Amino acid sequence: IYTLAIESSCDDTSAAVFKNNKKLSNIIASQAVHEKYGGVVPELASRAHQQNIVPVVDQALSQAKVDRKDLSAIAYTKGPGLLGSLLVGSSFAKSLAMALDIPLIEVHHMQAHILAHFIDDENQKIPQFPFLALTISGGHTQIVKVNDFFDMQVIGETLDDAVGEAFDKCGKMMGLGYPAGPIIDKLAKQGNPERFTFSKPKVSGLDFSFSGLKTAVLYFLQKEKKANPNFVDENIKDICASFQKTVVDILMDKMKIAVKDTGITQIAIGGGVSANSGIRTALKQAEIGLGWQSYVPKFEYCLDNAAMIAIVGYYKFLQQEFADFGSTSKARLKL
Ligand code: ATP
Ligand code: FE
């Protein structure tokens, strides 16, 4: 089964070609236009997708050495995401599927972040059902009990901001570029995580909250800058390390509760923030300290990419779960 997958939910245009569950290509075109605005501008994102989609798909096919006539199905991201961005991918996917007279498959973006673990790649360990997925990205923070490929249950989620959003917004306050997550991660590696403390939210159960942390960082920076205008510049590494440690502690504390509640000790992470070195290290330590088995996706499959859409497409193809051509993109879509 040859699947062509298209992902265009936010600001990366991506296309991948799979042979069954194996990646033949995974091309990602990032959009630099948003950097100067300090966040994604939806209108500009749709236009850039429109420019990128044909060359990105062509490159994915040529790198995979697959002729479009040999494709078995086209998979695309139905949602959630920015509507104008999603529509570029869905229109393209529909047109191509129609022209080639092959099935169309719609994919849930967050399901794809989770099932990215099933991409057959020698550098990846594959979890067994049931497992717990911690999806941490720019728009989501969820703990999902994954019983089977398409049987998932959200057992905890953020009540306000997503964890990636917290990284990006707090980074902006510190004067860092966009997206700030990877920049904070890099600076944190050279800083002292014990230097500053930020209070953790008091949310019971498995839900998260990150807006309080954002406010805490804001007040902290304001107070320190009043005493020393160069405070941020002089202490940026320690601020980043302390902030990152707080976030990782919040995530790990909730996972400990989830493990206790469900009795499941297999933990898989997904989404852009799973690229973070702090959470990766904490999970590795939990293998020894807590007896968990952790699954961390290959870097390439953490951020938005079409390979994760292709793997879901493949499993849906096996179940003959095809979309009709009247299906529409959805900015908001429940798991
Ligand atoms: P969603 O998947 O919820 O729809 P999204 O697709 O915009 O949102 P992703 O592309 O999966 O989100 O992830 C982007 C987020 O990941 C950004 O907030 C970015 O700052 C964050 N991020 C990326 N790398 C790192 C890192 N090393 N450390 C922390 N955060 C990171
Ligand atoms: Fe994403």
Image: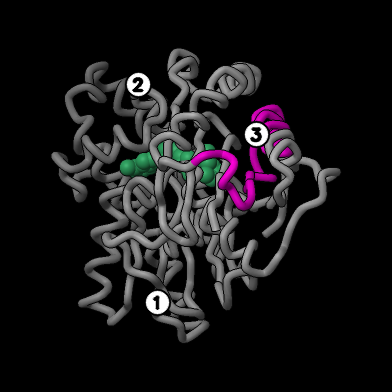
Which quarter of the picture shows residue 234?
top left
Q: Quadrant of the C terminus?
A: bottom right
Q: Earlier in the sequence, mark 3 or mark 1?
A: 3
**Residue 224, x across and y down, in percent:** 30, 28
Residue at point 68%, 52% (across, down): 105
Q: Identify the secondary structure beneath mark 1.
A: strand
Q: What is the quadrant of the N terminus in the image?
A: bottom right
Task: Tell me which amino acid carries mark 3.
Answer: Gly
> Residue 40 location, x and y as percent?
54, 24
What's drawn in magenta, residue-wise? 67-94
Q: Residue lying farthest right?
A: 326
Tell me the CA gap for discs 3 and 1. Answer: 34 Å
**Label 2 element class:** loop
Mark 1 sits on what residue? Answer: 266
The residue identified by callout 3 is 89
**What residue sits 64% from the left and 50% below the top?**
73
Q: In the rendered view, does 163 fall on the left or right side of 87?
A: left
Tag shown at residue 175? 2
Q: Is residue 329 left or right of residue 89?
A: right
Mark 1 is on which residue type?
Gln
